Amino acid sequence: PLLAKRRDVFRSYEDFPGPPTHWLFGHVLEFKQDGTDFDTLMAWTKQYPYAFPLWFGPFFCVLNIHHPDYVKTILASTEPKDDVSYRFILSWIGKTKGLLVSSGQKWFRHRRLLTPGFHYDVLKPYVKLMSDSTKTMLDKWGSYANSNESFELFQHVSLMTLDSILKCAFSYNSNCQTESGTNVYIKAVYELSDLINLRLRTFPYHSDLIFYLSPHGYRYRKAIKVAQSHTEEVIKKRKEALKEEKELDRIQAKKNLDFLNILLLARDEKQQGLSDEDIRAEVDTFMFEGHDTTASGISFILYSLACHPEHQKICRDEIMQVLDGKDTMDWEDLSKIPYTTMCIKESLRIYPPVPGMSRKITKPITFCDGRTLPEGSYIGTSVFGIHRNGIVWENPDVFDPLRFLPENVSKRSPHAFVPFSAGPRNCIGQNFAMNEMKVVIALTLKKYHLIEDPNWKPKIIPRLVLRSLNGIHIKIKPVDPQV
């Protein structure tokens, strides 16, 4: 039966040649977790410019697609997330499934109920809160500005984006940036991200029992307990506040509801709200997605600008003109920094915060070149590969913000650049994330010059969120306000 199962899976992907595979381990041994994973994937992307199969053990295979024409086929649909890799997240974000992994009618209902939480009227007042969180981080950087020593960005930016999402989406002041020591929630999120990736790559761990009994399973459960208790504390405090009738009246009358209020007060056409478990799943999802992915994006943007001082200078000049002496960003300023926005997009192209996504297809698919995949197959979208596909992008490894001039964008497929996914299942929080990136980059460049440290080159590791094995290091020095 096992041989028959392998044969059936093999036949599903036989139209697609790919790199040589080990009969037992598949391609798992090719990913050494030493920072060379990215190079391996990029080499295969160049060799197989449309798609290639990736085997995780002898029975599980994903067609890794990285050409816009292929990507369009899958992202234009509402196909469910795959039930293997995303299944491993469920114990974290809840068996009821949050918006990230739900499908069918549940996904449609939740998406409809949550969409008001990302209306621009709701996002508008967040800009000041984002500015406040950013200023706290930049003030902490003062010691680095005078030392000429490099420092690691990601840990600082993660605390700042966690501070920001808690203030904006949950009206919760955590003081996480000014507390001493490592934030336990962020540490738990890192741990969960690494262990989920490890579980996907280690096919015996696909068994719930084997993973549960393993040391990694123990670490996973311990990290989940920390992450979920953090979420429950945020929800509990808000629910206690809502018990007071005056507070409820005040919130319902308030024009600008935060995300948690919208979750607690949301009702469908049958006047049914979200269950307690649904609310926790969505809060867990947005707590993770709203801080970790944005932290990755911002960290790599700052690094990219440090490596390209000529572009950094143009951004700073643009920002200084728009801010005109102000030390905070306003909502209206976000649309007045086009060059900075192009630099942000170019960094997201080279360093996509979410390096991949996957689906299980529910009906046969025929691609643009006639090759087909049967029902029940798995597709993984390598965002790295799409954004660096040499057929689609000219000199894809060169940092060139002018790729995002309107006239250049119009010549490309809209599916050549999908940092927030695309189609009906695109990222519901993408405007929140872009606004935060603009605020952070603008205020950082106003205060500091970013300088590359040639002794520290990031070793890129694709996880649930893009990371660097050795951190992301830069140097800074103060900007002379008189210049």
Image (tube, grey):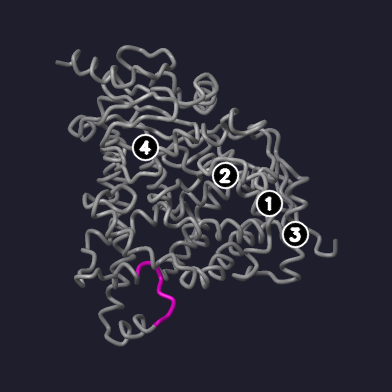
- Counting residues from the start of the chain, the first of labels 4 and 1 encountered is 1
- Counting residues from the start of the chain, the first of labels 3 and 1 encountered is 1
* Residue receiving disc 2: 348
Distance, label 2 to label 3, CA atoms, is 20 Å
Kind of residue indicated by mark 3: Glu
Q: Are the residues tagged 2 and 3 within 8 Å (C-beta)?
A: no
Give the number of the disc on residue 358: 4
Near-viewer residue (286 or 14)? 14
Near-viewer residue (354 or 62)? 62
* Residue receiving disc 3: 318
Give coordinates of residue 463: x percent, y percent: 43, 37
* Residue receiving disc 1: 144
As helix, strand or loop, the secondary structure at mark 1 comes to helix
Query: Which residues lie in the magenta part?
Result: 254-260
As helix, strand or loop, the secondary structure at mark 3 comes to helix
Residue 256 included in the magenta stretch of the image: yes
Distance, label 2 to label 1, CA atoms, is 26 Å
Give coordinates of residue 179: x percent, y percent: 49, 61
Number of residues whose C-alpha sits closer than 10 Å to that of mark 1, classed few (under 14), some (14–19) or many (20 or more): some
As helix, strand or loop, the secondary structure at mark 2 comes to helix
